[in-house]
Image (tube, helix red, strand yellow):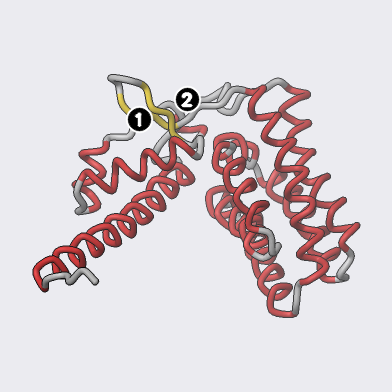
Amino acid sequence: MTQISSKEGRAHAANALEVLTTTSLTEAVMAELEAQIVRGDLAPGQRVAEAALAGRLGVSRAPVREACRALVQAGLLIAIRNRGVFVHTIDLEEALELYEVRAVIEAEMAAKVAASAGPEEVLELERLVAEMEARAAVPDPDGYYASNLAFHAFLADHCGNEHMRQIYRSASMKLHIYRRSRLRTETDLARSNDQHRRLLAAIRAKDPDAARHEMRAHIERNKHWYSDTGQMPGAETDQATRL
């Protein structure tokens, strides 16, 4: 059997640690980039300044490059040769297609959660609906949007199907500019949360068919609004305001 010297062993361990560290940092950078897109700090079409991001996060360029590559593969970013990496921009047609994907996937996720949710899961969904109700009353669109994302993400995380969760996550991330811009006024927020409340009632009643129906209707209402109006997010405002 081939013997490995202590020096070679240390080198191997060091290389393994470097790979682990880079992977961990890459995931952290990905999470930060996604958070910036959700918050609107990075707008659709905006270039990702890799050097500045690395400096701000206190990491080398390597995990930033890896994070950008991963998000390009996920469709959240787009790489343009000799220009850099930019936040993906979608047009109305692509947005409507993504809403169709969300309607199918999230309806099934809601049905699966309704069939399996225990008291703790229901309690957390109740908390999120109450939180959205409070933020709608202010109104606080940014706070409401954050709670809205948490509500849908909770269903994705507890549906018991990782492939569904990944498809939801990809479609959801690309639609942030549309989802956020739709929630502007107190009326929009209240109407949105009424739909969440009906979905919660179906889950509480352990009724998968009702949960599937309510979630699909919830997603399709937004799709139909954009389809019927033909309106792009922020058509009446500048980019900073619409995000």
Closer to the eye: label 2 or 1: 1
Q: Residue furthest bottom?
A: 119
Q: Give the quadrant of residue 95.
A: top right
Q: Give the quadrant of residue 11.
A: bottom left
Q: Is residue 108 left or right of residue 161?
A: right
Residue 54's disc is none
Q: Earlier in the sequence, mark 2 or mark 1?
A: 1
Frontmost residue, 158 versus 16 = 16
Q: Is the residue 42 above or below the residue 9 in the image? A: above
Q: Which residue is mark 1?
A: 85
Q: Residue furthest front?
A: 1
Q: Give the quadrant of residue 181.
A: top right
Residue under the image location 78 percent in, 60 percent down: 197
Q: Position of residue 23 (x, y in %)?
A: 33, 56
Dot 1 lies on which element? strand
The amino acid type, in three-letter code, at marker 1 is Val
The amino acid type, in three-letter code, at marker 2 is Asp
Q: Is residue 203 left or right of residue 3?
A: right
Residue under the image location 59 percent in, 28 percent down: 233
Q: Position of residue 141 (x, y in %)?
A: 57, 48
Q: Position of residue 114 (x, y in %)?
A: 81, 66
Frontmost residue, 62 versus 97 = 62
Q: Is the residue 142 above or below the residue 9 in the image? A: above
Q: Are marks 2 and 1 in contact (CB under 8 Å)?
A: no
Residue under the image location 78 percent in, 31 percent down: 224
Dot 2 lies on which element? loop
Q: Which residue is mark 2?
A: 238
Residue under the image location 79 percent in, 53 percent down: 108
Q: Circle 1: is it few (<14), some (14-19), or many (20+) Cα within 10 Å? A: many
Q: Position of residue 64 (x, y in %)?
A: 29, 44
Q: Quadrant of the N terminus?
A: bottom left
Q: Circle 2: is it few (<14), some (14-19), or many (20+) Cα within 10 Å? A: few
